[in-house]
Amino acid sequence: MHLLPEASWLQFNRRVLLQTERPDFPLLERLRFLGIWNRNLDEFFAARIAKPFLKSRRGPDHLALLQEALDQAKLARARYDSLLQEAFPRLRVLDPGELDDLDWLYFRVFLAEKVAPKTDLIPWEAAQDLSHSALYFASERYLVRLPQDLPRLVEVPGREGTYVRLGALMRWRSDLLLPEEAPLYEFRVLRLLESERVRADWNELAESLEGRQEGTPTLLVVEEGFPEAWLDALRRALGLFPEEVFALKPPLNLSLVDTLVAQGPPEWRFPPFRPERPRTFLKNPLALLGKRDVLLYHPFEDYAAVERFAEAALAEEVEEVWATLYRTGEENPLAEALIAAARKGKRVHVLLEGRARFDELLNLRWYLRLVRAGVEVLPLPERKVHAKAFLILTREGGYAHLGTGNYNPTNGHHYTDFSLFTARKEVVAEVRAFFQAMAEEKTPRLGLLRTGEGIRRLLLEAVLHEAHPKGRLILKFNHLTDPELLEALVYAASRGARVDLLVRSTLTRLHPAIRAKSLVGRFLEHARAAAFRAGGEWRVYLTSADAMPRNFQNRFELLFPVLDKEAKKKALKVLKRQVRDDRNSFLLTPEGEKRLWGGRHDAQRLEL
């Protein structure tokens, strides 16, 4: 059974939405998943729908995607009502009609002083220029934009745990916003925000991003009862077809539940998570790596170890540092360590990938900070760099970190990822060769490590080597869409091999002889790994790459072997526990999906 990548990804987002029904999750955690689902769907219409929208708009595939997204949106709205009922009376979202005279003493002034001055009145003639994702209102004469810098849920003073929607307040007192009182109807517009694939330099990247908010509209979301004549005018101004309009009950953006999650009772959240601290490593990482490799599995083992490794670049014996940065985030101790090392006189080289989708502005900010601190920021190569590598060089040798995740502290504490630290000369030499090729804008030539098409070739050879009744392989990716690799997996399974796939999001081929699972739980499954029994002696590889044609053809990724015996044993233990998981899993079959909840094997409570 073959699936469109976009259809498979939407099925993943439905699995995210279904987390709101998990009986073993506290209430606020279920609400959190409602917000995650909403942001995911916005991203879908801002980026992931691009190919069917641009190449087969209104064709069967595009229409099927729209229908699935609409079905999910209706289910999400029902889940919102259900979760609020469960939260009552400790958490409440009131309708403005439920506010009393004392409440209105405050909200009349709040609307007049805080909201009205920030509210834009837009003529209908400018409807084609409406911004992506913002909340708007339509009246007969004007369009009104809800201020972006105000909270969507406003706390009612003196009523603990009680809120009212800002949008509902604004429509209740439209006389404070319009020249005269008039009915207001909510709507949102979603647009394609893909910037041009600029590869030349940072200046051209900035120029490309300047026009991104003018992307083509892909979806119009309106509230039920939106006047037909106004809707027709709005839809035509945006160049959308009737199928590209969703009519839903407000609120139209369910990410507002984040306020409830942040402010709700602590006992309605997961207990605080305390990762294991690798104390010997944290004390002196370079000394430990002189004796053996270290493999850590985040967040169960503290991501602070990665930041501590970066801080080792400040040591006296360190002469040179190389690093890749992808989704750096607002605050980043690892990036600060690179800046400090440069200011201390070390030679620091950073390949800062500025084209990470929707993080471009943050990366431009880091680009300026790094350059002004004396860091050499390498030119943006033709291909996007998605590899995760950090190299520390001394007079005597070097130390490398290779990872499956981003050097982002928030992700490091909430995403499952592997970190391999090593001082093996052969690995350090290849990591150095990778960076040197990036500096010289050449394609790396690697042997022990693999990049680009070399990753695909290694995986294909390893899969085909297992194509026999005693064959055994486990692949774990976020996305598995490469047709050649999928064909090889089907062949191996048909020859009697046991094939286990752990694919979180996108899997474009399902086969009855292959056991495929998606894990969705408290932590985002983000690690990429491949294990092959190879006649009895397991071979284990970790990688930054998802198994997609674009990652093999259009990106610089890294795949690396786990050579240390104990490290290999740990990685296999993680993978095998996830194969057995029946608490956070969905079994993916050609006949449909089956929830595996409530069992005894919880891979997200890992004991290492």
Image (spheres, rainbow, N blue to C red):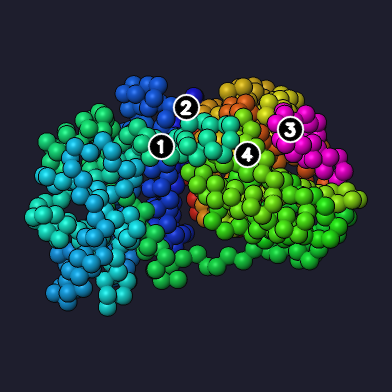
Please identify the quarter of the rendering in which residue 345 is found.
Answer: bottom right
Indicate the amino acid at tag 1. Gly
Q: Decide: marks 4, 2 in contact (CB < 8 A)?
A: no
* Number of other residues with Cα within 10 Å of mark 2, as a class: few under 14, some 14 to 19, many 20 or more: some
Question: Alpha carbon of mark 1 to alpha carbon of mark 4: how far?
Answer: 25 Å
Is tag 2's residue or tag 1's residue first in the polypeptide sequence? 2
Indicate the amino acid at tag 2. Leu
In the image, what residue occupies the spot 27% across and 78% down? 158
Q: Decide: marks 1, 4 in contact (CB < 8 A)?
A: no
Residue 460 coordinates in the image, percent (x, y): 69, 25
Please state if 484 lies on the left or on the right of 361 as rendered: right
Mark 4 vs mark 3, foreground winner is: 3
Mark 2 vs mark 1, foreground winner is: 1
Indicate the amino acid at tag 3. Glu
Q: In this view of the protein, can residue 596 be seen by the observer?
A: no
* Number of other residues with Cα within 10 Å of mark 1, as a class: few under 14, some 14 to 19, many 20 or more: few
Label disc, if present, on residue 440 of the rendered structure: 3
Q: Decide: marks 3, 2 in contact (CB < 8 A)?
A: no
In the image, what residue occupies the spot 57% across and 58% down? 331
Is tag 3's residue or tag 2's residue first in the polypeptide sequence? 2
Q: In the rendered image, which residue does mark 4 sit on?
A: 386
The segment highlighted magenta reads: 424-449
Q: Secondary structure at mark 3?
A: loop
Mark 1 vs mark 4, foreground winner is: 1
Question: Alpha carbon of mark 3 to alpha carbon of mark 1: how far?
Answer: 31 Å
In the image, what residue occupies the spot 77% across and 37% down? 436
Label disc, if present, on residue 3 of the rendered structure: 2
